[in-house]
Amino acid sequence: MRRRVVITGMGVVTPLGHSVDALYRSQIEGRSGVGYITHFDARTFPTRIAAEVRDFELADYLGGDAQKFEDVGANCRFALAAAKQALEDAGVLNGGVDRRRFGVYLGTGEGQQDFFAFISLIGRCYQSETQSVDVRRFTELALRELHLGREREQEPHTTVAHIAEYFGLEGPNYNCLTACAASSQAIGEAVELIRRGEADLVLSGGSHSMIHPFGVTGFCLLTALSTRNDEPTKASRPFDAQRDGFVLGEGAGMLVLEELEHARRRKAHIYAEITGYGLSADAFRITDSHPEGRGAVACMADALRDAGLRPQDIGYINAHGTSTQVNDKVETLAIKKVFGEYAYQVPISSSKSMIGHLIAAAGVVELIICVMSLRHGILPPTINYEHPDPECDLDYIPNVAREKRIEHALSNSFGFGGQNVSLIVSRFRD
Amino acid sequence: MEPRVVITGMGLLTPLGWKLEAIWQNLQAGKSGVRRIQAFDPSALPTQIAGEIADFDAKDFVDRKDRKALKVMSRPIQLAVCATNLALQDAGLNPAQVDPTRLGVVYGAGLIASELEELGPAAKLTTNGQPYFVDLEKWGREGLAAMPPLWMLKYLPNMLACHVSILHNAQGPNNSITQGDVASLLALGEAWRILRRGAADVMLTGGGDSRLNPLSMSRLCLFAPLSRRNEAPEEASRPFDRERDGLVPGEGAAILVLETLEHAQRRGAKIYGEVVGFASGFDRRRSGAVLAQVIGQAIKNAGVHPEAIDHINAHGYSTPKEDVWEAAGLAEVFGPNNNRLPVFAAKSYWGNLGAAGSVAELAISLLAWRHGLLPPTRNYRYPDPACPIYVLANRWHESHKDYFLKVAIGERGHCAAALFRRWR
């Protein structure tokens, strides 16, 4: 018998609340967290809207210790706050468990590059005539003007190191970065670490913010973002015929994953069990998903197989549902291929309609919404669903939450570049 | 029964060359891959030396039909893509003959710096000569239009593994581990787990990294403990030596083909060795205590007696601090002077290859098995009482025993250990 893995703690920082309860309540109410970008002056950008995290202070979570993290970026701040909630929730914040058997596996984004310092440097060293940079000048100025602490914090392994160091977790320590699939993949691989006995507990999840000039620039160039700037709260509209791109969100989500017997021994509260993990690669293009949903089909089927479940056992699908033309069409197609006739009966919704796309952190936050749906028997809607798309003809729980008792929920995350992950959470039964 | 996992191919792009025979000859000749940086003018930097790959042109390594894709690949991605091709050739493996859903990719990757020239026109338009000033209004209006549309995709760390999956139709598990200098060994550990749980038959694993550009080098000079031995580049990387003064940045890619034993034997593959143990952890006090437990666990998992180990392939940063805690961890496991168990540190030849480092380094041990001889650690002249371990120096070690241990550490406290068995 393989070791079973349960969730014993959860924490979030999101555009719609900084606690799991607040997030779930706003999901059920169908509120939108999207508004105009305030983190920087985005007035002339093709996209001026995003779902920002508001009223967030790290000191609310870490007290005076927040000062230790002066140079860290948003990724790390969100991660620390969500981790603190999850560890507290699981009752393991103050030790009592073997640190060596307690790992961390995150899917946390790269640090934010210091846009103003970096671009102003290049601007002074770029020679238009030769289309080249005066490297000697650039390096001279860079040494003088780049901020040592903030530069160090950009390395993608710093967040996971801060978390392990601050909370004293000495087990396996990983960070993966597979774009929009990262935190789901982190959870899946963390489950495998526990199943295979490399750890008894793993703090897993992710955090990300790309609502900064470089992030918005990058996505605008790819024409991936919604440009519905006049109606921010209507911009993220997964599966709606008039969807025109995704809306950036930001935040973090963390889970305490624990081996079942370990959780029982310390009488931990068990939220749910992670029963299925499937992963695949599209191996198609860096910019588009496979038109037949090859990878999406494979990872959903793989997760069902891993969980030993039939398609009809799944009571709810939390879709990747980005609100881009291609994703929503292909994901719908892939669900039909995996679920057959039952695809038309299983309720599906996209949390991104309300909180936007948290990129690396999207998967974990959406999985937490699945866990809450299992527990409370209310499925969150897809908001802004107004115009049916003939190619998206499934039940997307339009606009209003639905009561339904479910046993198993499946959550999809598909990353830019073709990494696909599906996770299944199940009501815990002995 | 869980499948056994063997290594059947390797592709290396290193400062000591890329042909396996050439790398070996350079090791035999005692050559160093560290030199004054030639990729750009380093004269304003406090550290002007690096382990650099000379004359790399990705076009030499990829099929004509795939060359167009090279344009959207930054240097670390190109290095990884090319090393992957070398690894597949070395393994005699045509990916088209593997079930695509059973072929996966897990690579280590680092932070990839944007090429300055790509941002140049937009930066020129929107800055006024003052530090920290950018006219954001103008950036939004005119700057974006002056940038390449796929700009962001050229620098995402998951693109190493993505491009490889696309070029070789690898539809199986695909992940990118961004864990600093431990990344590629953690990637190998994950690939090993994936094969053992039956989720793939063949996994490509390793990593690619390059910090040899003006931005990354400036950043490293600010916050990383770099060697400043600019006047003697070849002597700058000196792991565990008392006179070490910091690490030497490097670049490279190292990819291994991992297969289940059954798959390898079915196709009659040559086998370099078997992965038999792996463990990882976080040594938050950087004292070596957790590292020692991690090493102990990797050996214990494999059910191997420490006396069966032929040598230790160390991380050996060549920094004053990290070498001390690595040595403390080794000494705790193997006893004082690690019982004359030889320690080899490949960074002494080519510096720190970042996210590609651990796997490039362990590949030297695999080659050593093939030749029956392990090269000495370069530049180890003055033993350091703070590093009480037995470093193999000045002579080649006859490699007879059946196992070697690879250790990787990160400056923040990350650590991993893997145990490999010689194939007989």
Image (cartoon, coloured by chain):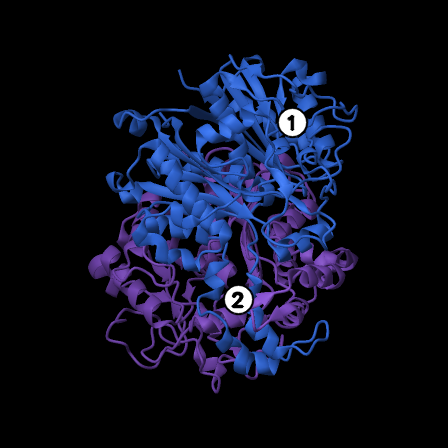
Chain colours: A purple, B blue
**Is B32 or B365 nearer to us in this picture?**
B32
Where residue B123 appears, as percent x and y from the top left, is 60, 73
Check residue B118 in the rendering and tell me which mark sits there, or answer none.
Answer: 2
The residue lying at 33 percent from left, 65 percent from top is A347
Q: Residue at x 32, y 48 (%)?
A: B63
Residues under numbered marks 1 and 2 in contact, where contact means CB atoms less than 8 Å apart: no
Position of B220 with respect to A2 (left or right) is right
Kindly state the secondary structure of the residue where label 1 is placed: loop
> Counting other residues with Cα less than 10 Å from the Cα at mark 1, is it few (<14), some (14-19), or many (20 or more)?
many
Q: Quadrant of the C terminus of chain A?
A: top left
Q: Amino acid at mark 2?
A: Glu
Q: How far is mark 1 from mark 2, CA to CA?
A: 39 Å
Q: Quadrant of residue B300?
A: top right
Q: Is residue B176 above or below residue B319?
A: below
Residue occupying image coordinates x 71% and y 17%: B337
Tell me if B251 is positioned left or right of B201 in this view: right
Q: Quadrant of residue A127?
A: bottom right
Between residues B42 and B126, which one lies in front from this camera angle? B42
* B282 vs B224, nearest the viewer: B224
The answer to whether residue A426 shows anywhere in this view is no
Q: Position of residue A337 (x, y in %)?
A: 23, 58
Badge count: 2
**SS at mark 2 in the image:** helix
Q: Quadrant of the N terminus of chain A?
A: top left
Q: Quadrant of residue A240?
A: bottom left
- Residue position for label 1: B378
Q: Position of residue B40 (x, y in %)?
A: 61, 54
Please name whichever residue, B54 or B198, is drawn nearer the observer in this view of the structure. Answer: B54
Q: Do marks 1 and 2 share a chain?
A: yes
Looking at the image, is mark 1 or mark 2 earlier in the sequence? 2
